[in-house]
Image: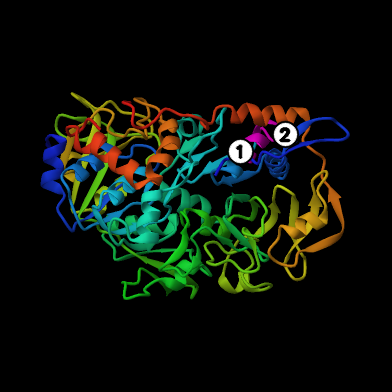
């Protein structure tokens, strides 16, 4: 799940070499402003949120569903409950408290989520793919904190790799609601937050059309064409008239990201069949 | 008053076939050694309740201990799938596994209701999700329903209380009277113990006196059934102040959990062949 997209890109202007996943994580980090409060999902969102805190947003308040408020890890946690989160937090509260007192009333500025499948209205599926609920082709982990993060944070940003498998016309199962079936659905459902404002992928950035709320390509990473983004989308992706070309990662961003990731275990770990 | 007993005795006396068992610990303080003892004593047809099944329930499900799973997030955190859980849901292996699925907010509130002696809890949640609409299907008991606020008329969501037969947790310390203390990420362990009929607490250390600790949760001895001294009993999760999370183990579990034979070998070598509290 944290495997890096290995396709390396060299920026023609700066001569900096980076992967598509690094570009995605840097773009996601840039979407967070200093001083915001951010409810962080594990994986790509956590990497991006920690990168933001290590670069332009030192005052970003990271909140994890394990109840750690204001965590300041110097290295990326593997889980949402690693010890470093509790040891560096401003406060550690119970799990009922984090959801009831902190998330539910709408105190948190931005929810930062991943997805296995996402549709053109930003609805997220992390439950089942294919078949039916009783007999799914693929059983995914399920909801976790995401349904209420998607409902109650003031806004939501989703970080997900783009492919025709993950970007679908309609999700197989609505785990977390984006804009439902379109305008008016969030209000009708009583969801208090504004919903997903950005989907950041390994190709560029999608934002909801102000009228239809359908996600539209508004930004592209260096060297990526709108045609390539359309090809890797399972619905007929609308493209903004003049999509922004997003600047590639600068050396400081890349250094900070690689430094954070150098601590995460990846290759040839000690086997659980060894004695501990 | 809690009795201080061996892990094997605690499991034997507290946990029986067909019980509803909640082993809690949110990433931190997961009672792995107790879970392994349940496997070793070959309990069957358990209803396993846990917000994040994690490796502990992957192991219990793969070993054939469970008939039903009540949960809210079943993955290997930061790594990927729980393959024994997926094999059970996708291929009914080793046995058919019934599932009852919630969000974290829903599960946390269900424990709060159980601990509070209430039949349900109220939250803003589930609206528009598939979880809400599949609830109560297939002959199962519905556990998510809309409810109207008697004061404002607003429609909110009610979730049914969880009342496990047994709660199992790991804590940093107990004293010789069986008062239990834990700190760091506290999850829903307090709620799970207070919601349950019986409880088993494994601890890193038994001390003469529990010093006050900032932010610590104390469960008085009279709320706990059994305390067992099991140092390292949360591995590969961790006990803040005693151990660190063994992230390498979580990464390496992927290959073992993925393969039925590798899992069977792991069970034989690392659970069945070792004494209680040593796995």
Q: Which mark is residue A47?
A: 1
| Residue at 40%, 33% in the rendered image | B249
Q: Is residue A49 magenta?
A: yes
| Residue at 46%, 29% in the rendered image | A269
Task: Please tell me whether mark 1 sits on a helix, a strand or a loop.
Answer: helix
What chain does mark 1 sit on?
Answer: A
Residue A222 to residue A225: above or below: above
Q: Circle 2 is placed at which residue position? A: A56
Task: Please tell me whether mark 2 sits on a helix, a strand or a loop.
Answer: loop
Residue B92 x/y as whole percent? 33, 61
Task: Please indicate, yes or no, whether residue B262 appears anywhere in the rendered image.
Answer: yes
Residue B277 x/y as whole percent? 21, 32
Residue B51 x/y as whole percent? 38, 52
Q: Residues within 10 Å of mark 2 (few under 14, many from 20)?
A: some
Residue B216 x/y as whole percent? 34, 34
| Residue at 31%, 34% in the rendered image | B234
Q: Nearer the viewer, residue B131 or A8?
A: A8
Q: Which residues are magenta?
A: A48-58
What chain does mark 2 sit on?
Answer: A
Residue A42 to residue B111: above or below: above
Discs 1, 2 touching: Cβ within 8 Å = no
Residue A82 to residue B21: above or below: above
């Amino acid at each position: 799940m944290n495997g890096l997209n290995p396709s390396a890109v060299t920026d023609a202007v700066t001569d900096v070499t980076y992967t598509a996943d690094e570009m995605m994580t840097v773009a996601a980090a840039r979407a967070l402003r200093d001083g915001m409060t951010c409810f962080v999902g594990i994986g790509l969102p956590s990497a991006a949120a920690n990168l933001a805190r290590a670069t332009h947003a030192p005052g970003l308040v990271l909140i994890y569903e394990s109840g750690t408020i204001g965590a300041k890890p110097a290295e990326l946690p593997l889980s949402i409950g690693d010890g470093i989160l509790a040891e560096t937090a401003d406060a550690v509260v119970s799990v009922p408290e984090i959801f009831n007192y902190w998330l539910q009333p709408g105190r948190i500025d931005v929810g930062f989520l991943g997805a296995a499948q996402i549709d053109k209205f930003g609805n997220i599926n992390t439950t089942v793919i294919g078949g039916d609920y009783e007999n799914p082709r693929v059983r995914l982990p399920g909801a976790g904190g995401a349904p209420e993060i998607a409902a109650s944070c003031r806004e939501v940003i989703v970080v997900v790799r783009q492919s025709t498998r993950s970007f679908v016309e309609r999700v197989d199962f609505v785990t977390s609601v984006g804009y439902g079936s379109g305008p008016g659905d969030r209000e009708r459902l009583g969801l208090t937050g504004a919903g997903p404002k950005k989907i950041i992928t390994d190709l560029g950035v999608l934002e909801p059309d102000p009228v239809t709320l359908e996600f539209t390509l508004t930004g592209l990473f260096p060297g990526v064409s709108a045609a390539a983004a359309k090809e890797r989308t399972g619905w007929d992706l609308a493209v903004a008239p003049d999509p922004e070309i997003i600047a590639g990662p600068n050396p400081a961003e890349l250094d900070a990201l690689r430094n954070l990731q150098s601590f995460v275990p990846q290759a040839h770990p000690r086997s659980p069949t060894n004695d501990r | 008053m809690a009795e201080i007993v061996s892990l094997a005795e605690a499991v034997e006396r507290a946990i029986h076939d067909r019980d509803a068992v909640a082993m809690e610990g949110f990433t931190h303080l997961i009672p792995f050694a107790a879970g392994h003892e349940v496997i070793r004593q070959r309990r069957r047809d358990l209803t396993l309740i846990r917000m994040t099944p994690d490796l502990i329930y992957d192991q219990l499900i793969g070993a054939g201990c469970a008939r039903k799973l009540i949960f809210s997030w079943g993955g290997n955190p930061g790594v990927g799938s729980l393959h024994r859980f997926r094999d059970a849901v996708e291929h009914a292996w080793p046995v058919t596994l019934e599932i009852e699925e919630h969000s974290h907010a829903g599960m946390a509130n269900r424990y709060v209701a159980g601990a509070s002696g209430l039949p349900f809890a109220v939250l803003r949640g589930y609206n528009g999700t598939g979880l809400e609409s599949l609830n109560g299907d297939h002959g199962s008991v519905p556990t998510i329903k809309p409810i109207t606020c008697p004061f404002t008329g607003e429609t909110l969501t009610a979730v049914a209380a969880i009342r496990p037969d047994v709660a199992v947790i790991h804590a940093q310390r107990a004293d010789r009277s069986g008062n239990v203390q834990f700190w760091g990420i506290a999850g829903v362990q307090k709620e799970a113990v207070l919601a349950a009929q019986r409880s088993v607490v494994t601890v890193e250390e038994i001390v003469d006196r529990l010093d006050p600790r900032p932010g610590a949760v104390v469960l008085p001895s009279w709320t706990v059934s059994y305390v067992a001294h099991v140092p390292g009993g949360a591995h590969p999760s961790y006990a803040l102040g005693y151990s660190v999370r063994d992230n390498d183990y979580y990464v390496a579990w992927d290959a073992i959990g993925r393969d039925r034979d590798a899992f069977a070998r792991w069970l034989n070598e690392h659970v069945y062949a070792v004494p209680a509290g040593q796995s």
